[in-house]
Amino acid sequence: MPSFEIDKVRADFPILSREVEGKPLTYLDNGATAQKPSAVINSMSTFYAESNANIHRGIHSLSRKATEAYENSRSEIKAALRLPDSHELIFVRGATEGINLVTHGLGDRLEEGDEVVLTIMEHHANFVPWQILQEQKNIKLHFIGLNEFGELDLEAWKAAFNERTRVAAFTHVSNVLGTVNPVSEMTAYARERQVFTLVDGAQALPHGPVDLSEVGGDFYVFSGHKVFGPDGIGVVTGPRDLLNSFPPYQSGGDMIERVQVSGTTFRDVPERFEAGTPNISATLGLAAAFRYMAQIDWEAAAAHEHLLAEQTTEQLKDLGGIRIFGESSGKTAIVSFLFDIAHPQDIGTILDTEGVAIRIGHHCAQPLMDYYNVSATVRASFAFYNNEADVEAFMRGMHKVKRFFG
Ligand SMILES: Cc1ncc(COP(=O)(O)O)c(C=O)c1O
């Protein structure tokens, strides 16, 4: 991988040099949260050490500087995402809050009998808010299934649209299967039928830049902590006019235009949906994460990640008794599996003794687990900073599992 210097990249992430259980950390739980480069950590500590102040309300220098830094972060992230001019970017706590904001706003427009098209591979974050709307509004939800490779059945998805369809909400990348959905095709299909779209980008951006002018559609959400940025910060983007027509989601300071005893008027987006003091330091940290990501050679990084995931999959299969979930050819570097001789809980515990961090459980995708008729899987999820030593440590742990239970 000549243009991708993995040792240099790893040196940017301080946590990767620590030990766990007396062994070098092997971090393969990137789907849950990603590690942070020094650039992100420093941007936040510098803010607190040198220029901490509240935004949007102070006349003093620090407050003006903090406001400028906060708004510059918004502009930088909008530019990195190539957000169309017609759209606005709102800072929220994460993908979950972004989806709730959208379901709250769109829900206001839905009427009894309206329909929403979802997929069976959604994270609970893009499942439960729709189910709550179903209860409140008596709308109908369609859950579209998958083919043998864990790819969305696109024909069935298209066939689910009818004259009552108002919204299609789908993940860009599955957090369990790694499947990459053809989001541009899907948003275009929905648009032709005047159906609103919400794309959950939480698992897409960690694997390379996303160009929202190409993705198209209405709403896109993601979480900062999965894109090498801080937690407690995320993004929802959507058409400005549509967002301005949504009722307030949370109310209080900063989102108001004029408050009188007789009534209150509200500001337009983005402030309309940023009530109260936002997570200022995390916003700066998120912009630092985008700057960091911008200098990565993503072609080389993606090839590197894929190779590691492929090596892992092949070596796992060599163990025998392995069932892989999600074998889409273009999938991201996520390997979900079951081992017929050991429970995921035991696998996770044994791997931890080797310093290997992986995820076990339903991955907040219980409908997908039900679809496959399993209760849990083991998931190794890679980032560009993983290396071959990580694959070796993981497989050492898996051989230990085999010796123990085999
Ligand atoms: C596909 C997907 N959507 C949404 C979420 C929710 O993200 P958060 O918990 O950061 O709000 C996750 C988290 O794992 C995810 O993988």
Image (cartoon, helix red, strand yellow):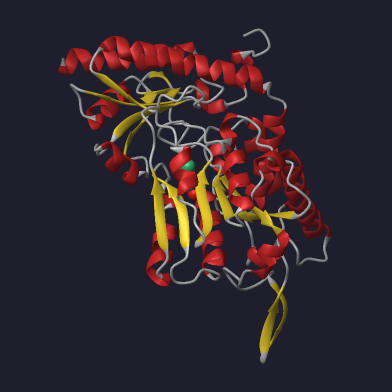
Does residue 52 appear left or right of residue 348 in this picture? right
Choose between 253 and 268: the one closer to the eye.
268
Choose between 52 and 314: the one closer to the eye.
314
Quadrant in the picture for the N terminus? top right
Q: Looking at the image, which residue is at 57% across and 68% down?
A: 249
Q: Looking at the image, which residue is at 72% across and 54% down?
A: 87
Residue 358, given in percent of the width and then of the height, sits at 37, 28
Extreme bottom residue here?
262
Residue 116, given in percent of the width and then of the height, sits at 47, 57
Does residue 280 appear left or right of residue 396 in this picture? right
For the image, the number of numbered tags is 0
Q: Looking at the image, which residue is at 54% across and 50% down?
A: 94
Residue 261, given in percent of the width and then of the height, sits at 66, 91
- Please identify the quarter of the rendering in which residue 312 is found: top left
Does residue 373 appear left or right of residue 113 in this picture? left
Position of 318 relative to 14 (above/below)? above
Report if residue 393 is visible in the image.
no
Quadrant in the picture for the C terminus? top left
Choose between 153 and 95: the one closer to the eye.
153
Residue 299, given in percent of the width and then of the height, sits at 65, 20
Report if residue 215 is visible in the image.
yes
Position of 365 relative to 25 (above/below)? below
Position of 38 relative to 81 (above/below)? above
Q: Looking at the image, which residue is at 62% across and 24% down?
A: 12
